[in-house]
Image: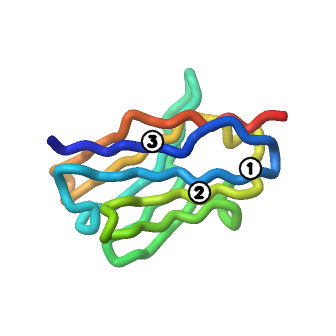
Amino acid sequence: QMQLVESGGGLVQPGGSLRLSCTASGFTLSVYLMNWYRQNPGKQRELVAFITTEGTTNYTDSVKGRFTISKDNAKNTVYLQMTELKPEDTAVYYCNAVYSNRYNFWGQGTQVTVSS
């Protein structure tokens, strides 16, 4: 069964850090474009960051310099290191894997809440 499982969300104070993990099973993550999205109720899902098969990364402007996406192919896992968190980073974060516009998998989401 092909699936993505996220972990690492939680409640953190403004200025704090969290590391999200997304582990793939049933397929090899290294050949997929890996994305992190986030979404709040009533809003569109927003692409936060992605990492290509070659390791090229890109970020939405609001998280540049604060978030880092990385992957460990040996562990079949992609990470999102989040620092200097702000209340506006509060959302459900989703991991997404895309291959050749043919395969598209989503995780179940993990809640990140930034609040004092």
- Residue type at mark 1? Leu
Q: Are marks 1 and 3 in contact (CB under 8 Å)?
A: no
* Rendered image: mark on residue 85: 1
Alpha carbon separation for disc pair 3 and 2: 15 Å
- Residue type at mark 3? Tyr
Secondary structure at numbered mark 2: loop
Q: Mark 1 or mark 3, which has the lower sequence index? A: 1
Whole-percent x, y for residue 112 in the image: 62, 38
Q: Mark 1 or mark 2, which has the lower sequence index? A: 2
Height in image: 91 above or below 96? above
Q: Single out the mark in the foreground, 1 or 2.
A: 1
Q: Quadrant of the C terminus?
A: top right
Residue shown at the point (56%, 21%) measured from the top left: 42
Alpha carbon separation for disc pair 1 and 3: 17 Å
The crowd level at tag 2 (other Cα within 10 Å; few <14, some 14-19, many 20+) is: few
Judging depth in this view, the residue of 91 and 10 nearest the camera is 10
The crowd level at tag 1 (other Cα within 10 Å; few <14, some 14-19, many 20+) is: many
Q: Single out the mark in the foreground, 3 or 2.
A: 3
- Residue type at mark 2? Thr
Secondary structure at numbered mark 1: loop
Horizontally, residue 108 falls left or right of residue 39, namely: left
| Most distant residue in the bottom direction | 54
Whole-percent x, y for residue 90 in the image: 67, 36
Residue shown at the point (59%, 59%) measured from the top left: 81
Residue shown at the point (22%, 58%) measured from the top left: 99
Quadrant location of residue 19? bottom right
Quadrant location of residue 6? top left
Q: Mark 3 or mark 2, which has the lower sequence index? A: 2
Height in image: 2 above or below 61? above
Residue shown at the point (70%, 53%) measured from the top left: 17
Horizontally, residue 5 falls left or right of residue 36, namely: left
* Rendered image: mark on residue 94: 3
